[in-house]
Image (cartoon, rainbow, N blue to C red):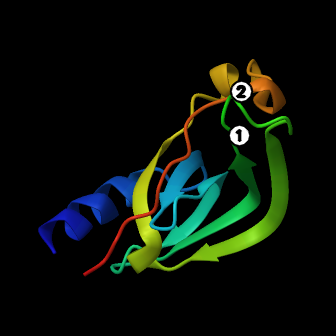
Amino acid sequence: MLLCSLNLDLLTLIHIEKVLVLTADGRTLTGILLSCDQLTNLVLSQTIERVIRPPDDPDPSAQVSHGLYLIRGENVTLCGLVDEELDASINWEQVRGSVIRGVKHS
């Protein structure tokens, strides 16, 4: 619970900033953080999901636009600021990498 409180303090400082969120099911989302609460529920606008393909996959990596997006706190694994200049310089369709596996709850 302490971790959630620390996250909330950080998140309240970065409202209206572009963030990257990794979810418990392994998705990578970027968007503008509009709101958060004590349960780490996040509201993002201009949300884009990045689908990074492995090196042996013939399909290109993709970015899927979702617009306004609500992420329940129990699904947030990581949330951090995005360096927008660096982010804009990367051609995300050509990025390849290993699949990020989801978090297994027991």
Point out the residue furthest to the front here: 56
- In front: 60, or 17? 60
Query: Taking 23 as reference, is 52 above or below it?
Result: above
Task: Please provide percent x and percent y for residue 1.
Answer: 16, 75
Q: Which residue is mark 2?
A: 95
Amino acid carrying label 2: it is Val
Q: Residues within 10 Å of mark 1 (few under 14, many from 20)?
A: some
Q: Is residue 39 left or right of residue 53?
A: left
Amino acid carrying label 1: it is Arg
Query: Taking 65 as reference, is 20 above or below it?
Result: above
Task: Please provide percent x and percent y for residue 82.
Answer: 56, 36
Numbered disc in front, either 1 or 2: 1
Q: Residue at x 31, y 77 (%)?
A: 105
Q: Is residue 59 left or right of residue 51?
A: right
Q: Quadrant of the C terminus?
A: bottom left
Task: Please provide percent x and percent y for residue 3.
Answer: 19, 63
Q: Residue at x 65, y 64 (%)?
A: 44
Q: Is residue 12 left or right of residue 92?
A: left
Task: Please provide percent x and percent y for residue 93.
Answer: 83, 32
Residues at circles 1 and 2 in contact by the CB criterion of under 8 Å? no
Under circle 1, the secondary element is loop
Q: Which residue is mark 1?
A: 53
Which corner quadrant of the image does residue 52 belong to? top right
Under circle 2, the secondary element is loop
Q: Which mark is residue 64?
A: none
Q: Residue at x 81, y 47 (%)?
A: 63
Q: Residue at x 60, y 32 (%)?
A: 97
Q: Residues within 10 Å of mark 2 (few under 14, many from 20)?
A: some
Of the two numbered discs 1 and 2 on the same chain, state the one appearing first in sequence: 1
Mark 1 and mark 2: Cα distance apart in space: 8 Å
